[in-house]
Amino acid sequence: MQGNKIIGEAAIRAGCRFYAGYPITPQNELPEYMAENLRKVEGGVFIQSESEIAAIHMVTGASAAGVRVMTSSSSPGISLKQEGISSMAACELPGVIVNIMRGGPGLGNIRPAQGDYFQATRGGGHGDYRTIVLAPATCQELADLTMDAFDLADDYRTPVMILADGMMGQMMEPVVFKEPKPRHYPESYKLQGAGAGKSKFIRGLILDQLEMEEHNWKLERKYQVIVQREPRHETFKLDDADMAIVAYGTAARVAKGAINRLRNEGMMIGLVRPITLWPFPTQALRHLSERIKEFFVFEMSTGQMVEDVRLALQGYANIDFHGRPGGVVPTPVELANVIARTYQKKNGNMKQL
Amino acid sequence: MKKVFSRPLYLKENIFHYCAGCGHSIVHRLIAELVDEMGIRGITIGVPPAGCAVLAYNYLDIDMIEAQHGRGPAMATGIKRVLPDRVVFSYQGDGDLAAIGIAETFHAANRGENITIVFINNAVYGMTGGQMAPTTLMGQKTTTSPEGRSPALDGYPVQISEILSHLPGAAYIERCTVNSPASIVKAKRAIKKAFQYQMENRGFTMIEVLSPCPTNWKMSPIDSCRWIDEVMTKQFPLGVIKDIAKADSGKGEDSHAG
């Protein structure tokens, strides 16, 4: 099954009942899948919105009305959605936003890239907030993390982003859909008409600065719980490694291929792959730095996650960086050659693969 | 003695923050009266805008969710599609609806969303201090058209109700005002009809209300009411602009004039 369609199917299985989106490459198969399949589900609503902005606000309204919601786009479209993502965070409304990244800035191109890391992990829109960011690297993970995203959004009542790229969206791999988790979430926040009871309102505008400050701290306390509980990462061939590659998503797939080649040449290299980009697996990296002193960050950007790696390692290990922005996906051999040069420089043993 | 007039049941006891002579408080009151009279208070969800009416939830005792500037129709769409048996309305000003949110407004109408927009047209951006709005009249002085609105520099007042009336999805559009007791009664009747159409799933409904803004117009409340009659209605004629129940609807004739 194709990556974009897997996200759609996983969302429907997770109980998503409202999707709004606007066409943009390379994620069009996802709205197309929702148009065909979500409308067949009882209560399922698909709307092709007039804009990215309208889509995120439709989704916000539907979220407030009490159903699981999703929107998707690619980089330039995600920039447009930021107003609504900020608003969802402020109003503490759950929702899943999928970004199938492409080359940027500006219109960029439609090739796979990872240039939206800063935007995704730093909140993206205005104001003091964070979004949980999940970075799948396989089609199986596209399915699993999409389903997890809905649970996390409901657990913390906050927008959650799936951050993948054009390669992940277009890739085809076999996939097994897991059973959705049973849902037990408080419903008191839902806005469905007051009935005979007390009316309520959902708002992000808080004119009193002390009240606003308290709301900011309330959100921050929630984010700190997420930082404690939710970081996820995968390690690969790290047990005996003396150098760790740090990469996520498609870049991590390329890195695994490179590591297998380098291992055959006797270079003791492994991989740390952040699965949550926010919260970043800071503690895991810090623990690793007690044993491994050489880190090599590879991203399909000019270097964004590398800043989080620096913050995590705090100077306790050396960090090298290799970036391929603009929609370039290097082959494992190309990456292996770059890593080998660095590895051998450290070990005084130059040799071309 | 029979009680003939009282505070609406679903108007909260907070004191309005609106300026003296502002139309918002009148329209709020009409909505509060209607949800009571129509027995729909428990199933009504309102979407207040960014603008002077952003705090509408302080006054209306119904479920409300605030929209970002211009996004009310998108948010109302999301709510209504999930809860089709609720009465969902978006409450918007002229900048919100006819400038930054014109795409959301136009396409909600074009999809024939079963929502109602209460559109407050006071020809200026009120909350931000009286800047030029898309509905500012030709020659009208505002803080951003200090020499008066000029067609060469600023373009023309947008007649959004007439524009939307051409869309097949629009079921009922009427332009009213609230500058006299008689016009207030008419406005209430229009909003009621819009809610009724919505409950009958007839499509998109919008009531435009020409609303006095004495503070930004730099006029007394009484002069403001007069200005609506003498100047504003020349650009924005009152009456039913679209009614799918009437084949001959259109061209701004006054449906309630005997």
Image (cartoon, coloured by chain):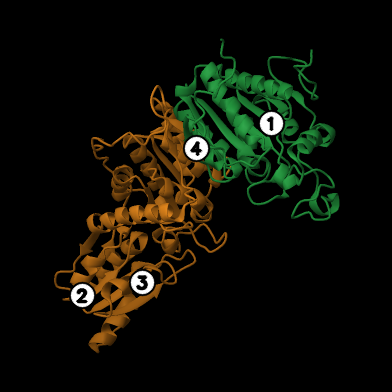
Chain colours: A orange, B green
Is disc 3 on the same chain as disc 2?
Answer: yes
Note whether B254 is above or below A175 in the view shown: above
Is disc 4 on the same chain as disc 2?
Answer: no
Residue sitting at 18 percent across and 70 percent down? A287
- In this view, the mark in front (4 or 1): 4
Disc 2 residue crowd, few under 14, some 14–19, many 20+, Cα 10 Å: many
- Amino acid type, label 1: Glu
Q: Are marks 3 and 4 in contact (CB under 8 Å)?
A: no
Say which chain tag 2 marks. Answer: A
Say which chain tag 3 marks. Answer: A
Q: Are marks 1 and 3 in contact (CB under 8 Å)?
A: no
Relative to B56, A330 lies left or right: left
Of the image marks 4 and 1, the number of the one nearer the N terminus: 4
The residue indicated by pointer 2 is: A289
Disc 4 residue crowd, few under 14, some 14–19, many 20+, Cα 10 Å: some
Q: CA distance from mark 4 to mark 1?
A: 22 Å
- Amino acid type, label 2: Ser
Circle 3: element type: helix
Note whether B251 is above or below A9 in the view shown: above
The residue indicated by pointer 1 is: B208
Note whether A61 is above or below B10 in the view shown: below
Q: CA distance from mark 2 to mark 1?
A: 65 Å
Q: Which mark is residue A306?
A: 3
- In this view, the mark in front (1 or 3): 1
